[in-house]
Amino acid sequence: MAFARDVKRELATIVPSAEHCRRAQLSGLLFGAGVFEIGAGGHYGVRLSVALPALARHALALLKPLEVDAVVRTVESAPVGLRYEILLGDEGRDLQALNELGVLSDGLSVQMTVPRRLVERRCCLIAFLRGLFLGCGSVSAPGAAVHLEFTVEDAGFAAQVRRLLERLDLRFSLTTRDRNTACYTKRGQTAADLLAVLGAHDARLRWEEHAVLGTVRESANRLANCDAANAGRAAVAGERQAAAVRRLMSSATWASLPASIRAAGELRLDFPYLSLQELSEVTEPPLSRSALNRRLRRLMDLAGPRDD
């Protein structure tokens, strides 16, 4: 979760310069972290609840131009701990602002639908998704199993979010749980691309650095395992060849062999642990790997199979 918090802190520093993008980002944040409450007398409010003080400051910065009567408070409860809440009511400018942000319909009823008019532009679409991620997004740390998701309560809204992501060529899946629906990806490249699109460039670099290190580590491990396996096979082959030479030396056949063949066998006895290539490099005079291999194979054929 530390990485996810770092991502949100980075995204919270982005306040779009254009008013339409600021409204789209605030709308996404309200849909991601807003709680809609109905009180006595038919009154209702919107409670924006976040865990990071940076997100609370970010929300207030986005709300300020709307001139709403926002109330800020801190609440601590188990098991979530300390949270920061921003409260909006159902009177005056608050109502108008919530309608402009797509949280309330023109009939002033709560709606769980992506406000189409706020996400027509690509820049506003990205801003909306940025706000939504700040409110309900999560991402696994680099090196862990890849999982990035938007967690929302309404399945229909989750499907709309997936379609928004598809407009950016980002393919996400949906899964329904007991209390919510997740729009998620487990593909590393998709998660990294979304971080970049939203503006979390430092987090994206951390992701890429770990991916590169992981690739290098995997490659090194493969090479090391390959080298170890090759060394093991060379040692087994060398010992078989040395055993064949010892059997020949104890027979009458050894004395009748050409000097070059006997020299190859004696060299293998002296260096049973060397690979064929390494053994060819210590021959005097120099001998190619293939030539040495032919001589050792002849010794193996002449010695025949071991008695055991």
Image (cartoon, rainbow, N blue to C red):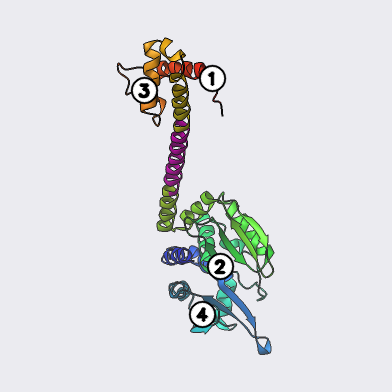
Q: Label 1 is placed on what type of residue?
A: Gly
Q: Is residue 231 left or right of residue 95?
A: left
Q: Is residue 167 left or right of residue 226?
A: right
Marks 4/1: CA distance?
A: 77 Å
Q: Which mark is residue 192?
A: none
Q: Is residue 58 left or right of residue 158?
A: left
Q: Which residue is mark 2?
A: 136
| Crowding at mark 1 (Cα within 10 Å: few <14, some 14-19, many 20+) | few
Marks 2/1: CA distance?
A: 73 Å
Magenta residues? 214-234
Q: Which residue is mark 3?
A: 267
Residue at the image point whose x is 58% and y is 63% from the top: 150
Mark 2 or 4: in front is 4
Report the front residue among 246 and 145. 246
Q: Assess whether mark 4 and mark 2 are in contact (beta carbons under 8 angstroms).
A: no
Report the front residue among 155 and 111. 155
- Identify the image quadrant of residue 92: bottom right
Mark 3 or 4: in front is 3
Residue 101 seen in render: no
Horizontal and vertical percent position of residue 11 = 44, 64
Q: Which residue is mark 4?
A: 81
Regarding mark 1 in the picture, which secondary structure is present there?
Answer: loop
Q: Label 2 is placed on what type of residue?
A: Cys
| Sequence-first disc among 3 and 4 | 4
Mark 2 or 1: in front is 1
Q: Which residue is mark 1?
A: 304
- Asked if the magenta segment contains residue 127, the reply would be no
Report the front residue among 264 and 122. 264
Mark 2 or 3: in front is 3
Q: Assess whether mark 1 and mark 4 are in contact (beta carbons under 8 angstroms).
A: no
Marks 2/3: CA distance?
A: 71 Å
Q: Label 4 is placed on what type of residue?
A: Gly
